[in-house]
Amino acid sequence: MAGEIPDLEALERTGTGKGAARQARRDGMVPGIVFGGDNDPLPINLPFNKLLKMLKAGRFKSTLFNMKVDGHDDVRVICRDVQRDVVKDLPTHVDFMRLRRTTKINLFIGVDVEGEEVSPGLKKGGVLSLVRPEVELVVTAGDIPESISIDVSEAEVGDSITISSVTLPAGAKPTIDRDFVIATITAPSGLRSSENEEGAEDEAEEATTEEGGEE
C-alpha cells in the first residue's frame, strides 16, 4: 500500500563516465542517477541482486521509494527509466527522479472493503471477489493516500462495485477513463449449480410440452 513507502538503499558513486559505470558492474552493482528537485544530479550504485529482485516483483516504475544514501537526506523518488542489456535483458543503469510535493505521479493504491458484516448479498452466501485489489491512480506526491475504500454494505448478489462509486482523495483520479469494476458479489458455486439445473429442467419441460402439442 502507498502508506508503506519502501526504503531503497544506495551508495554514492564516486567518479562518473563509462569507466566508473563498468567498475560498478564488475563490483556487482548497477549504476544509476538521481535527478530533479533543487539539488544537483547524484550518481549512485545499487546492489544488483536486490535491484533484480525488485524488478521481478513488478511495478517498479510505479512504486514510490524512500531513497537512503549515506551523507544525504532521505528523498522520495520514482523510477523513470531502466536500461537493460540487449542480450541478457539485465539492468545496466537506472534513472530516478526526486519528487516535489506537488509532483503528479501514477501509483497503485490498495483497496479496502467496508460493510462486509452487513452486506445483504454476503449474508445470503454471496462471494466477494476483488477484481482489482489495487487501483492505479494519478496522485500528488505530497498527498498520497494509504488506500481507497469500497462500500459493500448495501450490495446484493450479482452487484458490482465500480470506480465511479468510490470517493477518491482530493487531487486523485484513475488512470483509466472508463467506469471499471473493482469488486463483485457472486452467488456461491452450489447455488449457481442449482440454478443451472433448475433452468435445464424448465427447458426440458418446455420442450416436452411443445413436442406433445405438435402431436
Image: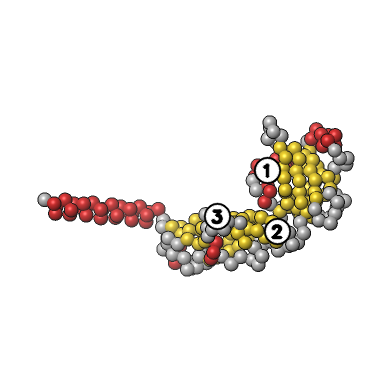
Tag 2's secondary structure?
strand
Tag 3's secondary structure?
loop
Question: Which three-letter amino acid code belongs to the residue tagged 1?
Answer: Leu
Q: Which residue is mark 2?
A: 104
The location of residue 98, given as percent across then percent down, is 78, 54
| C-alpha gap between disc 2 and disc 3 | 22 Å
Q: Earlier in the sequence, mark 2 or mark 3?
A: 2
Residue 109 vertical placement versus 90 (above, below): below
Residue 178 vertical placement versus 15 (above, below): below
Instruction: Give the class, few, some or many, for how many residues have Cα within 10 Å of label 2's Cα (few <14, many ≥20).
Output: some
Residue at 80% across / 42% down in the picture?
45
Front-lying residue, 89 or 109? 89
Residue furthest to the left in view is 215
Q: Earlier in the sequence, mark 1 or mark 3?
A: 1
Which of the image's four quarters has the N terminus? bottom right
Residue at 83% across / 35% down in the picture?
18
User: Which numbered circle lies on residue 193?
Assistant: none
Q: Which residue is mark 3?
A: 132
Instruction: Give the class, few, some or many, for how many residues have Cα within 10 Å of label 1's Cα (few <14, many ≥20).
Output: some
Q: Which residue is mark 1?
A: 55
**Left or right placement of residue 208 versus residue 195 in this view:** left
| C-alpha gap between disc 2 and disc 1 | 22 Å
Question: Which three-letter amino acid code belongs to the residue tagged 3?
Answer: Arg
